[in-house]
Structures are given as structure tokens and as C-alpha cells.
Image (spheres, rainbow, N blue to C red):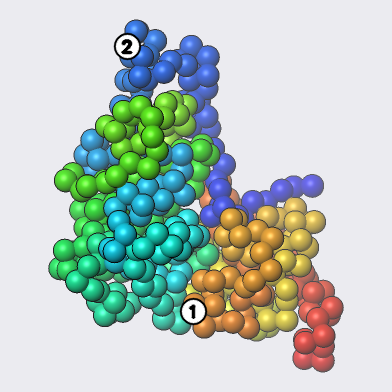
Amino acid sequence: MRRIYFDNNATTPLLPPVLAAIEPCFIEGFGNAGSIHQVGQRARAQVEAAREQLAAFIGARAAEIVFTSGGTEGDNLALFGAVQPCDHLITSAIEHHAILASTQRLQESGVEVTIVGCDANGVVQPESVQEALRPNTKLVSVMMANNETGVLQPVAEIAAIAHQANALFHTDAVQAAAKVPISVDEIGCDLLTLAAHKMNGPQGVGLLYVRRGTLLQSRQLGGRHERGRRAGTENLAGIVGFGRAAQLAVEWFANGGQQEMRALRDRLEQGICRTVPGASVNGGRAPRTPNTSNIAFPGVEGEGFVIAMDLQGVAVSTGAACSSGATEPSHVLVAMGLTEQARGSIRFSLGKQNTAEEVDIVLDMVPGVVRKLRELSPAWAGK
């Protein structure tokens, strides 16, 4: 059976040049970047070369890049490292659980937290952040692109509002990376999170951008790695692959990849909405990343749809991979006011490896899957 992978917001496959860059790190280039002998110093050189590549990718200085184990650790380090008890933190209701769970723990330790909502299109309005500011607001954290809908947030406007109140601004840019260009100066962020496996790099490595002069308390105790900001031996192979993935993303943008991916996404959306009665795109009226489509199918249970598609060789999802198995509807869609649609909404997220032929195969498949599932739905019977 041919397998088609349309769940790239959960994780992406390694691109062949990334795998080629990583392989030597497990054989002859296996050194500890903290060692002073030649094997260690060759490893250090590779780590620093990747740091330069990733700094260039987001328009930062190399010294502002802190390597982490992924997006979750980066988000945790940003929040726990920047705020203290009695500080005030503002975030949004549509954030990844790495942010929302962190804010809950921070509340328990004495941090004041305000969670602002979004509009019906899934956009956090800058005015709501402005209204939530307090004299003790220390940090505002709003994601750059939502992982479930792909909706892009007005992060530059929100950053400016935070700075006017002398607060720091953090953005989780994990789902924006390698889909839309990122410039830390254009955003105006003080902290920014990326994860390699969302941009065709390896799993288990990420980064936190920390603008020069931003005070950040380390959360891991140990050695003085990453200029004292994140203890632990650097993941050499992961970091090298992360840097190579960033290089490939820059080339992809230059070669029109963003436009080609958007065309595929639009082809998928338009085909489904044309052939499936009642289907609609959640967040479709807002600016989005070019690969993500979250489609509501009334009369369909999302998990049943995912299983039915998987049996036919197609991988899609009901939302964030970290929420797999959850019985509650998506907190993102609920925040958008889509309570009824949330249980029957499916995320299709394309990747650089997907083709127009694969889109057409899925378009041929979806109407039949929906029709069969609706036949089993008492709520849809007779419609």
C-alpha cells in the first residue's frame, strides 16, 4: 500500500542532505564539544558552524542561540527563565500545551497569569493584550503560527505593545519555521523558540533565541554549556542536522517553495470543499502558513476519520500530536468558538516531500470516507 503523509505539523521527514550531514557525527565525528583535544574541538567547530547557520536563518547573532532538546524545552526555558513569583505573564488561549502547562505551573508558584482569547478566525487581537497589561507584566508570550490551524499571529504588533510596557516578548515559532520567513528584528522578540523536527531536521533538538541583554535564569543544573544558559552536553548530530535543515529552508524560500506549497494546500482545500457537502476551513479567512489546512466535516467524528484514512494509507490528524488520545475537543477550535465543529475537524499539513499527485489521491478518497462515516452518525441520518 502506498503511504501518503499529510501530518507534517506533527513531525517532518529528514531531507536526504540533512541525513548525509548527520551520519558522520555517529562514526568519525563523535566528539564531545566540551573537550579540548582535537576530536572535541572538531565537534565544537561543527556546533558553532550550525549555530551560525541558524542565527542567519532568523537574523540573529550566533551568541544569541541557545540549543535545547526541542520546542517544549525552549518554551519552558523562556517562561520559567524570564519570570519570577509576583511577576505577571500574558499568553493566549490557543498556545501549544508546552506554554499552557507551563503557565499553570507558574501560577502555582505565585506568578500572575492572564490568558487572552482569539477571534473567530483564530487570531489573537493586539488590543486584548494591551488591555491585559499590568504594572508588573514581565513577559508576553504569543505563538507565531498556530499548530492546528496554521493561522499567523500579529506578533510584531504584540511585541511592540509588550515593549511599551517594559515587558519582554516571547514567541513560539516552531510551526512557522521553514514555512514563512522569520526575522527576530522584524518581529521585535526578545525570546523565540524553534524545533528542528518541524523543519525537516532531526527530532530531539531545538533552540531558544535570547536577545542580547535579556536576563534568563537557567533551568538545568550542571556544566556551563551554552554560555551557562542550558547545562548538558550538546547533541552534536542533532545540531549539525538542524543547521543543515535551516540552510535548505533558505534555499527553498529562494526557489519559490512557499508559493508552490500554498498552491498545493489551496488545491486540497478547494477540492474538499467542492466535493464534500458542509465542509469548511477553520481559520480560512486569516493569514496562514502555506502548508496547513484545518477542515471541519459536520457529522463526522475526527478520530474515526483519521483511522479510516490511515487504513487507506493516508496519515492526517485531529490536531496536535501531543494531544493524541485526548477525549476533549481541540482547545484551539473551542477558543475560536467552534465547539460543535471541533470534534469533526481534521488537520491536513503538507510537507516539502508532498506532490500534486498525492493531493489528487487524497481528494479522490475523502468524499467516500466522509460519506461512510456520516452513514454511521445518528446526528447526520436523513440529512
Residue at (36% x, 63% y) in the render: 110
Q: Is residue 286 visible?
A: no
Q: Is residue 8 rendered to the left or right of residue 236?
A: right
Q: Is residue 113 rendered to the left or right of residue 64?
A: right
Is residue 119 or residue 253 the one in the foreground?
Answer: 119
Q: Is residue 169 above or below residue 118?
A: above
Is residue 317 or residue 190 the one in the foreground?
Answer: 190
- Mark drawn on residue 36: 2
Q: Is residue 167 visible?
A: yes
Amino acid at the residue labelled 1: Met
Pinpoint residue 343: horizontal percent, then vertical percent. Answer: 66, 75
Describe the element under mark 2 as helix, strand or loop: loop
Is residue 334 or residue 179 the one in the foreground?
Answer: 334
Residue where numbered disc 1 is placed: 336
Quadrant location of the C terminus in the rendered image:
bottom right
- Mark drawn on residue 211: none
Pinpoint residue 71: horizontal percent, then vertical percent. Answer: 45, 48
Describe the element under mark 1 as helix, strand or loop: loop
Dot 1 or dot 2: first in sequence order is 2
Mark 1 to mark 2 CA distance (whole Å): 54 Å
Question: Counting other residues with Cα less than 10 Å from the Cα at mark 2, is it few (<14), some (14-19), or many (20 or more)?
Answer: few
Residue at (58% x, 55% y) in the render: 322
Pinpoint residue 294: horizontal percent, then vertical percent. Answer: 56, 69
Q: Is residue 52 above or below residue 273?
A: above
